[in-house]
Image: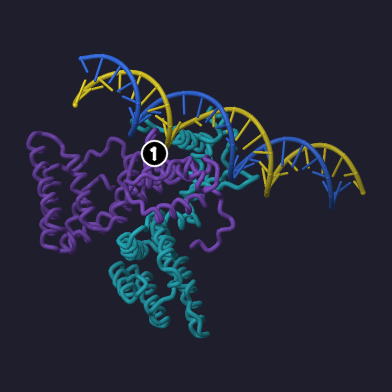
Chain colours: A purple, B cyan, C yellow, D blue
DNA sequence: ATAATAGGGGTGGTCAGACCACTTTTAATT
DNA sequence: AATTAAAAGTGGTCTGACCACCCCTATTAT
């Protein structure tokens, strides 16, 4: 496995051993890991070393630990901890700029893949989201959540979990630099019309058109400026 | 900052506090953080809590700690720890497939940006790498390192550090599933010719052409199958 | 017999202290 | 002044204590 393991700190070795345990015990998402005390005994290390390893995994969203219950394997979930990390990553203006750009690029990548792969179910979902958006606009509200869900559904429809997670990370990081400005500068009716065009292209499995419409949509978005 | 901080574990609060210290003390990449003992005292927590926070940052490559010396701020560097994480992330065949696909997509994104932004210096560098590749092929060697450097230089020329880091992560993760097969299936001379075309397009700042040539290059690569 | 409550055991969360390996700084010796 | 040794400081790991919370079992009340 690892080529050169001589210089690994103990918590790093524990990480590898925990991975082995997951494989050996055939644990999957949602399953509970052995307790800290059991892991310490099993791996012949101190409990602190186990905890250090687990903290590292926890920050990555790969596990979650609950007092009184135990430690559970997660599907690399996004969670509030991403926000903490973002302070470390986004320390200067260039990094923030890179993030906004990345987000835009990933949205295009996602919509291209979605156009190839989208299922009836996701199409239906997009249409429901669209409908709810329209209703919100009619009653004078801004469909922020629907806007987010629209993009999220496309990301999921791409059927590339890694890319989805990167998009999700970009969204979460973005929250720390765009405080309060989830608010769109474009007019909601315009966004809805653009969403319609994107859905049309996805239905038609038209990669080029989907890309084009998404580009147009994003270009009008001061969000991504 | 954080909206709702009531439910944060101590190590999470420590992470935030360390971030504050970095900002207040105006620490930058390469600077040394206060010692664990000082942090523990300064933040009024146990040293274990400090260590748990630091382990989490370390796994992300945001810091490095050295026995006898201290803890240093890193530029979110790639390092051996990425390999450990990859075992957790790449647990099934779909994840591996997603990774390979992601890598391909990112390479395209990078070359597009590079075509817009590349500097004379990077062009020169690419040309030198190309030359070294040619020399290696002439002497019967396979220019694996030059191949890697070629792609890395393009990634850097994109001038989007986040995207570069994602690419780098994809490379590192990829090492664990393509053991030994950094070896290319394509013939080296063909790759070199393709590299030439890509460099041509980059020099011309021709985004479409750069993309097209990179797609062609990647399509011929069983590496990304 | 069923429902509610209490207690016990187990889990994670945090702290303090001890001691070790290594590095850097200071002091002593040449 | 240069070299060596000792002291101080740093991270690395372990142990043990105790707390907050959760789940399960046993007991009590209805």
Residue A170 appears in view: no
Residue A49 visible, this orientation: yes
Q: Is residue A101 left or right of residue B171?
A: left
- Image coords of residue B177 (percent x, y): 40, 65
Where does the N terminus of chain B fall, quadrant-wise? top left
On the rendered structure, is A148 left or right of B139? left
Residue B200 in which image quadrant: bottom left
Q: Position of residue C28 (x, y in %)?
A: 87, 39
Q: Position of residue B105 (x, y in %)?
A: 31, 63
Q: Which residue matches tag 1?
A: A70
Q: Is residue A116 above or below residue A60?
A: below
Q: Name the image quarter holding the C terminus of chain B.
A: bottom left
Q: Residue at x 48, y 56 (%)?
A: B78
Task: Tell me if mark 1 has few (under 14), some (14-19) or many (20+) residues whose alpha carbon lies within 10 angstroms of its own.
Answer: few
From the viewer's perspective, is A129 left or right of A8?
Answer: left
Along the line of sight, which residue is nearer the eye, A31 or B62? Answer: A31
Task: Point out residue A17 in the picture as x, y percentages from the top left corner.
Answer: 48, 53
**In this view of the protein, which residue sits in the foreground, A214 or C8?**
C8
| Circle 1 SS class | strand
Quick one: B206 or B12, which is closer to the camera? B12
- Callout count: 1
Q: Is residue A140 left or right of residue A35?
A: left
Q: Is residue B147 above or below residue B85?
A: below
The foreground one among B153 and B179 is B179
Q: Chain of mark 1?
A: A
B133 to A73, vertically: above or below: below
Residue drawn where x is 17% and y is 42% of the image:
A146
């Amino acid at each position: 496995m690892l080529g050169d393991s001589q210089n690994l700190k103990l918590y790093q070795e524990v990480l590898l051993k925990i991975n082995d345990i997951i494989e050996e015990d055939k644990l999957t998402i949602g399953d509970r890991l052995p307790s800290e005390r059991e892991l310490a005994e099993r791996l012949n290390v101190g409990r602190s070393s186990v905890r250090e390893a687990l903290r590292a995994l926890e920050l990555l969203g790969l596990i979650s630990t609950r007092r009184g219950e135990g430690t559970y394997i997660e599907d690399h979930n996004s969670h509030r901890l991403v926000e903490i990390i973002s302070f470390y990553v986004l320390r200067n203006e260039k990094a923030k700029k890179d993030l906004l750009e990345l987000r835009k690029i990933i949205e295009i990548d996602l919509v291209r893949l979605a156009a190839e792969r989208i299922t009836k179910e996701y199409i239906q979902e997009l249409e429901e989201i669209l409908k709810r958006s329209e209703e919100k606009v009619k009653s004078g509200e801004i469909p922020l959540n629907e806007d987010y869900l629209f993009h999220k559904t496309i990301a999921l429809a791409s059927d590339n979990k890694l890319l989805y997670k990167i998009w999700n990370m970009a969204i979460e990081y973005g929250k720390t630099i765009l405080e309060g400005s989830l608010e769109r500068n474009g007019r909601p009716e315009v966004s809805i019309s653009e969403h319609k065009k994107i859905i049309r292209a996805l239905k038609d499995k038209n990669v080029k058109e989907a890309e084009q419409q998404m580009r147009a949509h994003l270009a009008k978005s001061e969000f991504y400026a």
